[in-house]
Image (cartoon, helix red, strand yellow):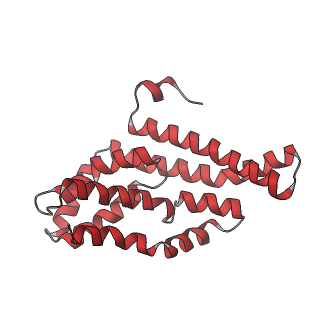
Amino acid sequence: MLNKGVFFCPSIINTGELGTTLTENETFFVFLRNELETEKLSGSDALEAGGKGTITVASACTMAGIVAGCITSTGLASKLLRAIVSASGGVMIIALLLTMICCIVLGMGVPTTATYCIMAATCAPILMSPEIGVEMLAAHFFVFYFGIVADITPPVALAAYAGAAIAKAGPMKTAFNASRLAIAAFIVPYLSLIHI
């Protein structure tokens, strides 16, 4: 159940809660519709099957929301910025690799708009620091891109989990196959930054 705070005081954590609630409801009705169409189940059987299919996606959303909320609310993001800049030693490719990992972790299970807010606040400053020297627009594109790619990257891989539940396949196998098939998606942002 949504509270008024989500609409009047949208913090990152409340935005994640709203996104999780909307995702759970949307996923449930997708499963319900597919069960009714493909197997010609009765209404109660379809509700049961839809509810079971939703559990996988709902648990992934919940855990990802907890992780993202903890990282942003505890100040770990600013410590992460300093750590990545110092670990890279000013070498752009190392900073890009470390930032990519950071973006994938922070983007797990977060709705698109909240993903951009989190990436812009925590990861884009890493690349825009004077030591790394990436332009602002390019840095924002890079971090947002990998924040969204988190939807197909294990262990959370919400898009792959939803697809696996609909296809009645193993969620982790589907997530690894999705990542393997989208390997070009991991290369494109690097190429765009090298040519900028």
**Which residue is drawn at the image coordinates 38% and 61% (left, top)?**
146
Query: Position of 179 compared to 99: left or right?
Result: right
Residue 57 horizontal side relative to residue 95, left or right:
right
Give the residue at x 73% y 47%: 51
| Camera sees residue 81 | no
- Judge whether 96 appears above or below 147 on screen: below
**Residue 47 in view in this figure:** yes
Q: Residue furthest front?
A: 195
Residue at screen point 36% across, 48% down:
116
Total labels: the figure holds 0
Residue 21's place in the image compared with 95, above or below, is above
| Quarter containing the N terminus | top right
List x then y, in percent, for residue 79. 23, 53
Give above or below for 116 relative to 89.
above
Q: Position of residue 59 (x, y in %)?
A: 59, 51
Give the residue at x 86% y 44%. 44
Taking the image as shown, residue 83 lies to the left or right of residue 66, namely left
Relative to 83, is 118 above or below? above
Residue 98: where, in percent of width, then height? 29, 66
Screen quadrant of the C terminus: bottom left
The x and y percentages for residue 86 are 16, 64
Which residue ends up furthest to the left in the rendered image? 130
97 or 84: nearer the eye? 97
